[in-house]
Image (cartoon, helix red, strand yellow):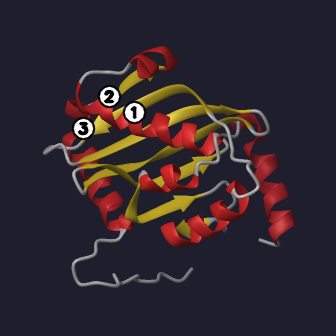
Amino acid sequence: MTNTLVRPRRPDARPAFLVACAVAWSMWSVGSALAAVPLSAQEAAGGQAGVRGEVSAILDALHEAASEADFDRYFSLYAGEAVFLGTDATERWTREEFMDYTRARFDTGTGWTYHMLERHIAIAPGGRTAWFDERLENANLGETRGSGVLVMEDGGWKIAQYNLTIPIPNEMAREVAQRIRALTGG
């Protein structure tokens, strides 16, 4: 396995993975003092007071814009250095790469629809970084999980990283791993 150092294009740019590393460290070091608060679909839709509610509203807007194939609104919610991780192991897209993929899809008038079932949000000390995980329902994929990081950028919350996964029941994990190895030659 080769590790690659990605350098920012501008001296002041901070890649999303550095933000994610800082968040992971914060989560570890702060521990239970910042336990994520679960939100039901009804609670999130009704709007929560404070920062968790603001973050939840951004995620709701993201899913709504994707469902409506609203390209401009969808990408207005992402940070400049955002990264999207898709369900396939090869799907690691910068914001620009993900815009290219999404534009082709949204131009057909078709987006993707995910309904939030449950969401957990935590805010880092200082209130400028948030992380989340959410259980989602999709007509084609069934239950999925989204997780990621939001940062304050240009006076508002922006998604710095979004990771979409398909949870696999533990009882099926070995079989699925074997099938993936067979498919990829790994």
Q: Position of residue 177 (x, y in %)?
A: 76, 54
The residue positioned 29% from the left and 52% from the top of the image is 151
Residues packed near mark 2 inside 10 Å, few (<14), some (14 to 19) or many (20 plus): some
- Is the C-beta separation of discs 1 and 3 under 8 Å? no
Residues packed near mark 3 inside 10 Å, few (<14), some (14 to 19) or many (20 plus): few
Q: Left or right of 16: which side holds 93? A: right
The span from disc 3 to disc 2 (Cα, nearest Å) is 21 Å
- Is the C-beta separation of discs 2 and 1 under 8 Å? yes
Q: Position of residue 102 (x, y in %)?
A: 64, 60
Kind of residue sitting beneath label 3: Gly
The span from disc 2 to disc 1 (Cα, nearest Å) is 6 Å
- Is the C-beta separation of discs 3 and 2 under 8 Å? no
Kind of residue sitting beneath label 1: Ala
Give the residue pinned by disc 2: 53
Residues packed near mark 1 inside 10 Å, few (<14), some (14 to 19) or many (20 plus): some
Q: Position of residue 128 (x, y in %)?
A: 21, 48
The span from disc 1 to disc 3 (Cα, nearest Å) is 25 Å
Say which element carries label 1. Answer: helix
The residue positioned 47% from the left and 81% from the top of the image is 3
For residue 57, which numbered disc appears in the image?
1
Kind of residue sitting beneath label 2: Gly
Mark 1 vs mark 3: which is more N-terminal? 3
Q: Position of residue 110 (x, y in %)?
A: 74, 48
Give the residue pinned by disc 3: 31
Of labels 3 and 2, the one closer to you: 2
Q: Left or right of 155: which side holds 82? A: right
